[in-house]
Image (tube, helix red, strand yellow):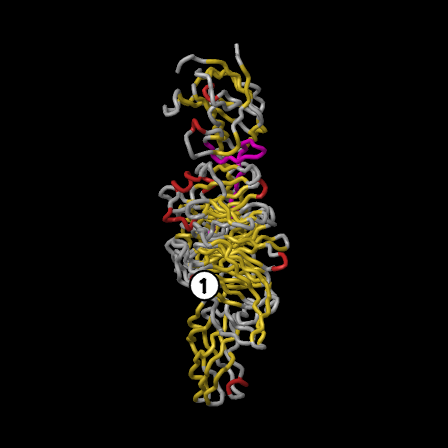
Amino acid sequence: MVKKVFSIDTQPGVQRDGTIFDINFYTDGLWVRFQRGRPRKIGGYRAITQTGTGYSRGIFVNSADGVNQVFNGYSSGLEVINVDNLGIGGGVNQFTFNGIVLTTGTLVGGSSYVNGTYTVVTLTGGTGSGAKATIVVSGNAVTSVTITAGGNGYKVGDTLSATAASIGGSGSGFSCAVATIDSGFTSNALNLWQFDSLLDSQGSGNQLLLAHPGLNLAQIDQTSNTAVLAGSVGGTALQPLRDTSGTTPTGNTISVSGGVVVLHPYVFVYGDNGLIKNSTAGDPNNWNGADANETNVSSTKIVKGLPVRGGSNAPSGLFWALDSLIRVSYAPTTITVASVAQTFYWRYDIISSQSSILSSQCVIEYDGIYYWIGVDRFLLYNGVVKELSNNFNQNYFFDNLNYAQSQKVWAQKVPRFGEIWWYFPSGDSTECNDAIIYNIRENCWYDAGGALGARRTAGYFSQVFHYPINAGATLSEQAILFSASIATTNASATITIAPNNQVSNGQLVVSTSINSGAIVTVIVPTLASTTATGSSAAFTIVVNSATGILRNQAVTGTGIGVGAVVTVISGTTITLSVANSGAVSGTLSFAGLTLTLSTTATATIIETATFNSQAGQIILWQHEIGTDEVIGTVFSAIESSFQTSDLGWVQGGPSQSSPVGDNYWLHLERVEPDFIQSGEMTFQVTGRAFAQSEDVTSAPYAFSPTTGKIDLREQRREIRLIFTSNVAGGDYQLGKILLHANVGDVRP
């Protein structure tokens, strides 16, 4: 007869530090979180795109008019993916990096110009503005162009010219091509991106994307400066941010080693030797105005800046140096010395000079409180800097962190569940493969358990787009997806294939007649219909009109053989790939796909090509959606599990912890599940005779959402239960499980 019925009293959180026997919290967990003090499965994730480029080193999201622009920075560039509020959208669009003209190349001299040397000539044309040159005209044609001011926003290949009025008053036909530029961006494996946005209210009137690709991925304290880049948030081009407006512009590019942040309406940049520098209000191109400033507030590098509530001293911001925390506030103060008045606009306060920061990416704000990881503890700022107590997994984190990759630690929040996540590379992993989680509402800690969903290199928390967006940490490998016949034309970037529902943008096309690196960029269906005649068993037909008919189109109609495609077009005579199955008559249909590639063909031919996935690509994931991993139409189960604390009599029993227990084995005879549950789950009984003995784990006991009880005969002196969900569509929230237990053997 069962002696007692208990409920499980394990406390919320997964405690990794300490011994299992000494823990009143859950002792293990995989992709599990806590709500109302109970475990529940963490949400699923869906692929937004499988063609992100390289490892992501920074993500930023801008939302407007129902479109969410997902900016993804990687080592050799920046790309944007536009999605709606459900995460559905278009393809990946690459940014171009425009810049300052350095030299010009191909020169067309024109004619009828007035001989002479002309200085400070404004150059017209191209994608940028502001370029000036010294132009020499000899023999009534332009013979040389020397750049004296590079302007900004130009790209290599731009065609420039000048008005006749600026070079003598007559003549025409002069042009020169931009040969080299200073774009402010260099591809580098160490690039780590920081982003923000600002309304350029004093200049273009555009909302600007500000981006800083710092060489900070390997070392948080590196000192090399790189340019801050800027461009319209709705465009796909960036250029160096420069001091070009105001009363005394220097023309200098704004370059720092730390990063960029907007304290509206000011742009702040920061870097080595405690540098903090800001523009004038509303004008990111004016760094010389009265309210612009530059100062050094620390002896160490500033690595991160975030806006903070400033009250009467708004705007305000917090800036993290390697060893201190600084608050910057807008506090105009006029000081008069010897009848000379001077206004100081900014106040710099050292909040703490005895702080530390592990990674420039590990700071996160949650409801006005700032959380981050120091080099050996967790910290917060709520008006003062304080240690964030962590008795759950502090040792687990610092003992397993790959310190050589600590700059890759990054923070994200999930406000729906009151969570802050810190992703980190553990063991010898060079990319993030786990995450520790602080739950503010439950005041407890847990971790992702090394789940696949924690293998993310960068992300952005939910705001208007109410799903977190995270970048996967697994690079794709080139693999053949399918083979198909293609029709190529020499020197053309377009090919034709028969209708095929497997082809998609971003695939790599490989064949002997196409230059290497051919990526599908555009897919256009091609359709034609016309009447035709032809003899049975012949390989040719005669059409009324060949308009719209292309090689490799599939042909269907009366008398056409199965699988026939167009191989040769000669006037109205069409040669097919298979013989006619009968007399051809009536209207025929011609259908195919025209693909535009990133490279051209080297021959005119019909041949078989392979369509491949590209190597070096990543998946951008939409998290907290559904319960499964979803890639296209493929749904895969996400395993989730949790393990209770010790429930044995020696601990006081399943529902209480007591300093004095009974030296009996616990004999478990029945479990009454209580879950909000989808899909089948299992539980296992595990435990040991002594605290340092090996665990003995039972076979799984399965139960469904309608299972009332599970009868069993398991006994352990120190006993724990493991619950697991690992089926597609599986989900759970724990309720109040009842355990039927009796006294087992008297002695262990």
For this view, does 542 lie left or right of residue 189?
right
- Residue 548 placed where, x, y %? 54, 57
Q: In this view, does 238 lie above or below 103?
A: above
On whether residue 740 falls in the magenta region, the answer is no
Q: In which quarter of the image is residue 744?
A: top left
Q: Give the range drawn in magenta.
A: 28-52
Q: Position of residue 657 (x, y in %)?
A: 50, 24
Residue 400 position within the rendered picture, expressed as x and y whole percent measured from the top left: 39, 41
> Disc 1 residue type?
Val
Instruction: Return the x and y of residue 215 as percentages of the image width and height.
Output: 41, 58
Determine whether the residue tagged by mark 1 lies in a helix, strand or loop.
strand
Verify whether residue 48 appears in magenta.
yes
Residue 444, visible in the rendered structure: yes
**Dominant secondary-structure state across the stretch colored magenta:** strand
The residue closer to the viewer here, 70 or 155, is 70
Q: How many marks are shown on the rendered structure? A: 1
Quadrant showing the C terminus: top left
Front residue (pair 67, 92):
67
Residue furthest out toward the top: 1
The residue singled out by tag 1 in the image is 256
306 vs 642, nearest the viewer: 306
Instruction: Indicate whether 319 appears above or below 455.
Output: below
Q: Is residue 147 above or below residue 380?
A: below
Can residue 574 be seen at all in this image of the molecule? no
Q: How crowded is mark 1: few (under 14 residues within 10 Å), some or many (20 or more)?
A: many
Residue furthest front as drawn: 338
